[in-house]
Each structure stands twice: as structure tokens, then as C-alpha cells.
Amino acid sequence: MSQLLDFLAIVGRGLISACRTLGGVAIFAGIGVSHLVRPPFQFRQFQRHFIEIAYFSLPVVALTALFTGMVLALQSFTGFSRFNAESAIASVVVLSVTRELGPVLASLMVAGRIGAAMAAEIGTMRVTDQVDALTTLSTDPMKYLVAPRLLAATLAMPLLVIVANILGVLGGFLIGTVKLGFVAQTYLDNTWDVLEVMDVVSGLVKAAVFGFVIALMGSWCGYNSRGGAQGVGQATTSAVVSSSILILALDYVITEAFFSR
Amino acid sequence: MTPSDREAQRSVNQPGNASDRGAQRSVNQPGNETPKIRLRSLRKSFGAKRVLDGVDLDVRANHSMVLLGGSGSGKSVTIKCILGLITPDEGLIEIDGQDVSKLSRRDRTEMRDRIGMLFQNGALFDSLPVWENVCFKLLAQKRITRAAARDKAAEVLAQVGLAASVGDLSPSELSGGMQKRVALARAVAAQPDIIFFDEPTTGLDPIMGAVIDGLIVDCVQRLGATALSITHDMASARRIGDDAAMIHKGQIIWTGAAGALGNTGNAMVDQFARGEREGPIQMELRR
């Protein structure tokens, strides 16, 4: 009996802790967003983070998308050729890239690069009193550190995903025409014929949501880090892990919302 | 207090050395004078550990008080409570006779605008050049343009003995002593009327420590400000303090003139001031 009670106590503590964290993240997000509509606005900070996310993440996102499109075309060919369905390769590549692989893989790459950097920077500021210093210098840390990051990531991710979509389709096109012998015009026609506006829009909505999640978790984990270098390291790991899991979970939710009919 | 008020006050409060300041204390010590900062029964616990256990402290206007105490005695928590960085569990914090806990958000922000703080490790912003660090508050309050901020930063850096060219460097390019000077420049740039110094000489060699102390005294006198410093360094405490107080186990156990440190008649304070191993204060060792 006592073992059962101990087990229930552990489960209960875990649930309470999870609820507390969830509530904390929700309040943190609410305060961060509220600063986006209340002056003064931190335009310089927004500009700095937007360039950091949108411009400096381009190489890693571009390479990821290009090789993903190439692998997708190759794998589809080897699979579909068993059913004489090679002509569907262009459709599979463009739908997979725009609906799923573009936003999800680009976001996971950005989560590793930017989410970790955000957690490390804010976490270091926290453990070296720089966050407290902001308060004593008449500046709300949420307004200065968090709000510009949330906005920058939310706006930058869709732009990155547009680039990822184009390069992913290009990767499939290159493999299809150069290696698999498709006629270029036929491949492009198949691509355009199957693509609908909603395919692209759903991917961009996902990108915006994922961008917000990356900045939110990076900021949250950094802002709440404690205990010096080890604490900052843990915050960085937590930021990447939590944002990656949330990206995959929210991917399902958004897909359900757009395509469950 | 307006700049002209401060100027008038400076002409009255222009002590040249510790003995002058002592003489001034007796002049400026009417019994019913409202303290600049007043703490009563301040309590704060972290979990089961009670850090502040009823702190009572008065800091007189235009005076420099030094708060002494061992590691973990509650010095930093006291300052963080006054600054609003930590919310106390109980107790009263008054600044200029106003209960800080009853201030509206706007009033609290306005109150913070009048306060400067030098953090123990400087807490300079790595992502900004020195000049932007120095004028951060002025820029945040939109009291100055970015172009004018560079000139202002050069002016304030000169007051702490740094060349204008230092303004273009990153904080990571500076030595510990220079970082401390920049942090001091940032603390005084907006001309606050209350300044907190958190262990200003920790980690510096004795000569640099004395230089920083001299700069602190100069800045506090020039601004006619009220200062509250926390330190372990007795030499530093005597140099920068008019008054001193000692906190032990979360309570103020002594207040008096900083010049009397070492000969206060309080066994705990005298042991601490002389750095003696034997005495009523025993180091707690975790077993």
C-alpha cells in the first residue's frame, strides 16, 4: 500500500511540476506578446535578431532543404518504380516539401542554431546579473530581451521556409532531370499542376508558429536558468529539446487543422 | 531633486576627507530627519532558509553608508529588496518617506530612474559597446539621442579616468579594473540621487581597489547622492563610508560611524573588522 502511495506521490509531483511549468510558459508568452503592442518598441533589438535568424540561418536551411529534396526524389523513384508510378515523383516532392519537410526541417535546424543561442545568451545574462542590471537601468527585461526575439523569429521563419521550399523543389528537380532522366518541362508541369495555394500557406503558418515556439522556449529556458555555467548549459539543452518536441507536436495539430477534412 | 538643488547641496556637502565627513554628520543629524532609505522588520526566506530576519536600517540623505557582513549574511538580498529585484516576505521599505510596496508601476519606474547600481561583477552588456553601456539608461529613457550619447559617454568616462576611445571597445576587451570603472560610469551617468555599490573592489588589486574607492567618493560627492555600499573590504569601507552597519544572520547588529570600525566596542563587529578567526562569530561549516 505504501509503495502505491509513494508511486502516486511521484506521479502527482510530476503532474504539478508540469502544470506549473506550462502555466509559467503561458504567462511568460503572454507578457512577451503584450510588450509587442506597448511602447516603447525595441526596434534595434528586433532588427538585430531578425538579421541573425533570417540572414545567418540561410546557409544551414538552404543546404538542409536542397539535400532533403534530392534524397526525397531519389527515394521516391526507387519506391514508386515498383508500381510504375514514377510520374508521381514531382508531385510527392513538392507536396512533401511545402507541407511538411520545408517548415519542419528548417525549424528544427533553426531551433538547434537560434534557440540554443537565445537560451545561452539570456542565460548568461541572467547568471551574470545583466538581467537585473536592465531593471535597474529603467528597462523591462521582457521588453528588451524577449519581445523582439518573439517577433523576429515569428516573421523570419516563414521567409526561411519560402527559401527552403524553393531549394527543396530544386533539389528534387535536379535529381529528377539529371539523374533519373525526366524531361525538365514535364517535371515542372507536374510540380505546378499539383501545387495549391493552401499547401504553401499551411507551410508558412507552421513556420510562423514554429518560429514563435523556438524564440519562446529559447527565451524561457534562458530567463529561468540558474547556477552558473552548468545552469546555462542545461538551459541550452532544454531549449533545443523542448522546442524540437513542440515543433513536432504542433506540426500534427496544425496539419489536423488544415487537412483533416 | 533637481540638478540645481543638487548643486546647492554639493556646495554644503563638500567634505574633503573622512574627518570632515564626520564633522558634517554631526551637523546633518537632526533627530527627526526623514532617512533617504528606511527599512523596518524586513524579512525574506528562500525555502526553509531565512536570509533576512527583521532588518531595520536607516540611510541618511546625502550620506554614504557601508553595509558589512559575512558571506550569506543577507547584504545582497537587502539591496535587491530595496531595488525591487526581490520581493520581501514582510517588512517596510521606504525611499524618501514613500512605501515602495504601495507605489504604482509608473511611480516605481520613476523611482528606479533616480537610482544607480554598480554590480559586483560589473554586469556590463556584452552585446553593446562601452559607450552604449554607459549611456544605456539615458537612451532607454529617451533623454538623449544616440549621437549625443557618444559625447556624453566620453564625458562620463573621463570622470572615471578612461579615455574616450575606450567607448568604442567591447566590455570583453577591458581588464577587470577598467570594467569596474565603466560600470561605475554607467551607474552615475544618469545622475541618480541614490547609488548602490555591490562589493565594488572585489577581485581588484589593492591599488586598483583604492582607485575605484576614490572614484566612488568623487562621484557620490559630485552628484550629492546618497550611497549604500556592501563590502567585505575594511579599507574600502573606511574610505567610502560615512556611516556603517553590520548585518549578521539576517539582522542589523550594529550601526555607527565608518571611521570607528575596529574599535566599536561590539565584539562581533570588531572581530569582523580585524579579520580575526577567534571571536563570537563562528563560521558555519556544512557537515
Image (tube, rainbow, N blue to C red):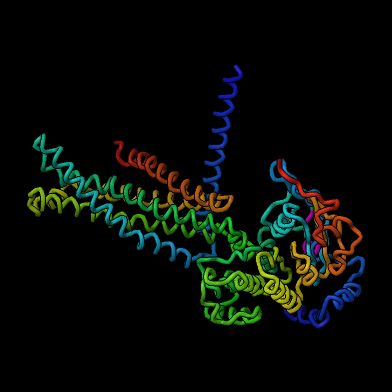
Q: Where the C terminus of chain A falls, by quadrant? A: top left
Position of residue A136 relative to residue B74, above or below, is: below
Q: Residue at x 85, y 65 (%)?
A: B261
Q: Residue at x 76, y 81 (%)?
A: B7
Q: Is residue A213 magenta?
A: no
Residue A169, x across and y down, in percent: 20, 52
Q: Where the N terminus of chain A falls, by quadrant? A: top right
| A49 sits left or right of A230 in the view | left
Q: Is residue B93 magenta?
A: yes
Span shown in magenta: B92-97
Residue A190, x across and y down, in percent: 13, 48
- Name which quarter of the figure residue B60 lies in: bottom right
Q: Nearer the viewer, residue B186 or B148?
A: B186
Q: How many numbered discs, if any?
A: 0
Q: Nearer the viewer, residue B18 or A147?
A: B18
Residue A220, x across and y down, in percent: 51, 50
> Furthest-top residue in view?
A1
| A192 sits left or right of B185 in the view | left
Q: Residue at x 49, y 53 (%)?
A: A119
Q: Residue at x 55, y 33 (%)?
A: A14
Dominant secondary-structure state across the stretch colored magenta: strand
Residue A3, x across and y down, in percent: 58, 20
Asked if one can make out residue B186 in the rendered structure from this viewpoint, the answer is no
| B278 sits left or right of A53 in the view | right
Asked if one can make out residue A155 in the rendered structure from this viewpoint, the answer is yes
